[in-house]
Image (tube, grey):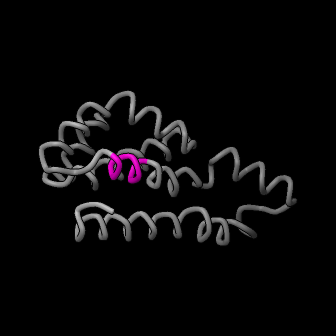
Amino acid sequence: MIPDTVLGMAPGNPLISLAASVNILAGITDSASGGMSIALQTLSATYLELGQAVAIDRDLLHRITAIATGGLDALPHNGAVITLLSVCKMTHREAYKDIFVVAYAVPIVALISILILAHITGSF
């Protein structure tokens, strides 16, 4: 169900679909590497075909995949976030706002910026 949904998000732009699928899977698994490995195991051939069809460089597909792993992998239920809060003796209420900015908002803004640059230039 998830692959069909993300593949249909931006039918003409596989970069947006790829970024969304990796990010969603990273959020579901609570792991950047887990989201990337699942996305690549299940959807890599599809994204390579889609990329070739619209002349997107494989290196750009790889960069978007790597950058998209940041963001949703830092949701409040993530094991690393919980461990960090435990070690620092803080609660989600006290510290998650800062974690959200550093580990969620900034990576998402960077991903959107790179998607815009990729759309404008075609590759970089």
Q: Across the whole image, how many numbered discs are drawn on residues?
A: 0
**Main secondary structure found in the magenta portion:** helix
Q: Does the magenta stretch include residue 21?
A: no
Q: In this view, does 47 lie above or below 116?
A: above
* Identity of the residue drawn at 54% across and 45% down: 32
Q: Foreground residue, 99 or 70?
A: 70
Left or right: 30, with 99 as reference point:
left
Image point 33% across, 48% down: which residue? 61
For the record, the magenta segment spans: 59-65
What residue is rendered at 50% in x and 54% in y? Answer: 72
Q: Whole-percent x and y of residue 44?
A: 32, 34
Viewer-proximal residue among 93 and 41: 41
Q: Is residue 63 magenta?
A: yes
Residue extending farthest top: 41
Residue 23 in picture, x, y percent from top left:
43, 50
Left or right of residue 95: residue 116: left
Query: Residue 113 at x, y = what percent?
Result: 38, 71
Instruction: Tell me the quarter of the image containing the N terminus.
Output: top left
